[in-house]
Structure formats: C-alpha cells, structure tokens
Amino acid sequence: MKRVLVWLLAAAGAAVSVIPFYWMIVAATHDGDDLFAAPPPFLPGDELMANLARLEETIHFSRVMATSVWTAVVYTVLSALVSAMCGYGLAKYRFRGRGALLGVVLATMMIPFQVLLVPLFQMMASIGWVDSYQAIIVPFLANSFGIFLMRQAFLDFPDELLESGRLDGAGDLRIFYRIVLPCVRPQLGALVIFTFMGQWNAFIWPLLMLNSEERFTVPVALNHLIGLSHVDYAGLMLGAFLATLPLALVFLLFQRQFVSGLLGGALKG
C-alpha cells in the first residue's frame, strides 16, 4: 500500500508539472482568440505554421534564437572556466587572505541583483558597452555560486595526484586541464546546466543593455509581443515552447553529470 501511495503521489506531481507545458503546446497551435473560448481547446489545432510565420515576421525569431544560443554558449564556456580556475585556486593554493577572499565571494551571493543594476549600467555606459554582446556576457563571468561549487569539488581532490604531476614535470596549467578537470566532470556538468539556464532565461539585464533588435535575446524579443492594446498570446506560447527546446537539449546532454554532481556530496563516505 505504501508503494502504491508513493506511485500515486508521484503520478499526481508529474501531471501537475506536465499540464502547463501541454497547455503551452496546445496554445501554440491555435489562434489567439480561440484561447479565451469557453470551454478552451484541449487538443492541438492547425495554426502552428501560421503562428510560426507571424512570429518570424514580427520579431525575426530565428535570428533571436541564434543570438541567444551564441551568447548563452559563450557565457557558459567562459563562466565555467573562470569558476573552475577560481575554485581550484581557493581550494588548492595556500596564500594569505584566502579565507577572507572566500568570505567576500560568499557575501556577494547575498547581494540582491537589483542593487547592482544602476552601478553596473553606469560602468557599462562609461566604457561604451551599452547595446553590445560583451555587456551581457563579461560582467557576470565570475559567478560566485559557480566558484563555491567548484571549490567544494576540488577540496576532495587528493593532493598526492598534484604532487605526482609536478614530479613528472607538468606545470600548473597542464595539471589543471589534464588531471584535475576530468575528475570533476560531474560537478562541472551541473555547473554548465545551471549557468546555461541562468543566461538563457536572463531578462532584466539584457532588457536594460540591448537597444538594437538584431541583438535581442529570446526573453527580450518575446517581451515585445506584449503591446499596450494587444497581446499575441499564441505567439508568446509558441516562442516560449521553442525557447524551452535548447534547455531540454542541454539537460539531456549533461543529465548524467548533473545527477552525479548533485549526489556526489551526499554519497561521500
């Protein structure tokens, strides 16, 4: 009976999670006026291609998707590399002020992002980076959460392997890339998923920084479908559905590392 109850609760939770996505898919295949009919449609319609053509004509969605993929991939790769290098330095190097530096990194996690908007915008404007890709990539490369996550992963790495690499004549960079990084792939995979999702879904900062339509990311472009007198709900649903596909792909590619990275600390010892 306990097993049956667990399965029923799991099925109910799965249904609650899937229903919004199913409604998003159904709404993406109907005309916007049909969504407010009584009763609303529960099966997919035949307006998918019309909605897709209108979405492409309105906000050039294919270009927006390409821009978002490019910025998210570049940011994820650079941020993961910076986080791994910083976490490795804080975990394996002994230097004065290491504890204070770690405290500063952790303290930045408690600062609300809204507090940083004005000074960051002034900084970007002073160096001429407004309406540029580097403005939405560079300021957040040093991710405090990523640094802390990778530091915790490197703390469990045995120092004997590092000494063996140095005795064989390997430099610090070679040891880091050839010995250390392959051993923390689960934590690095989890970081890649979190980082990609954060950059892909970022809205406030790109909305402030980007002025040219050819540089819009997906959340900013979809926001332009919401007008003062008209909202293209079908286009919004279709755009949101298409925007979830890269996230699902990244999760499928790194799901094994993601689960291993989350359970690594719980299974230790």
Image (cartoon, rainbow, N blue to C red):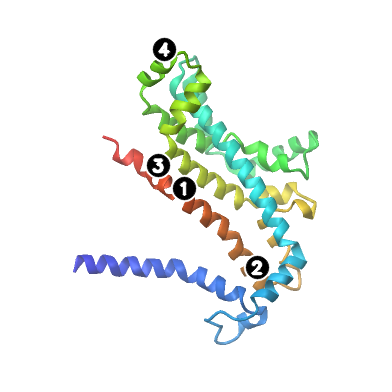
Name the secondary structure under disc 3: helix
For label 3, the crowd category at 10 Å Cα-Cα, with few meaning under 14, some 14 to 19 and many 20 or more, is many
For label 2, the crowd category at 10 Å Cα-Cα, with few meaning under 14, some 14 to 19 and many 20 or more, is many
User: Residue at point 37% right, 44% down?
Assistant: 260
> At which x and y percent is residue 220?
70, 56
> If you read the primary sequence from the N terminus, does the residue marked by circle 1 or circle 2 appear first?
2
Alpha carbon distance from label 3 to label 1: 10 Å
Residues at badges 2 and 4 in contact (C-beta under 8 Å)? no
What residue is disc 2 on? 236
Nearer the camera: disc 2 or disc 4: 4
- The answer to which of 120 and 63 lies nearer the viewer is 63
> If you read the primary sequence from the N terminus, does the residue marked by circle 3 or circle 1 appear first?
1
Residue 14 sits in quarter: bottom left
Alpha carbon distance from label 3 to label 2: 34 Å
For label 1, the crowd category at 10 Å Cα-Cα, with few meaning under 14, some 14 to 19 and many 20 or more, is some
Residue 38 sits in quarter: bottom right
- The answer to which of 48 and 4 lies nearer the viewer is 48
Location of residue 134 with respect to 214 vertically, above or below: above
Q: Residue furthest left?
A: 1
> If you read the primary sequence from the N terminus, does the residue marked by circle 2 or circle 4 appear first?
4
The amino acid at mark 4 is: Leu
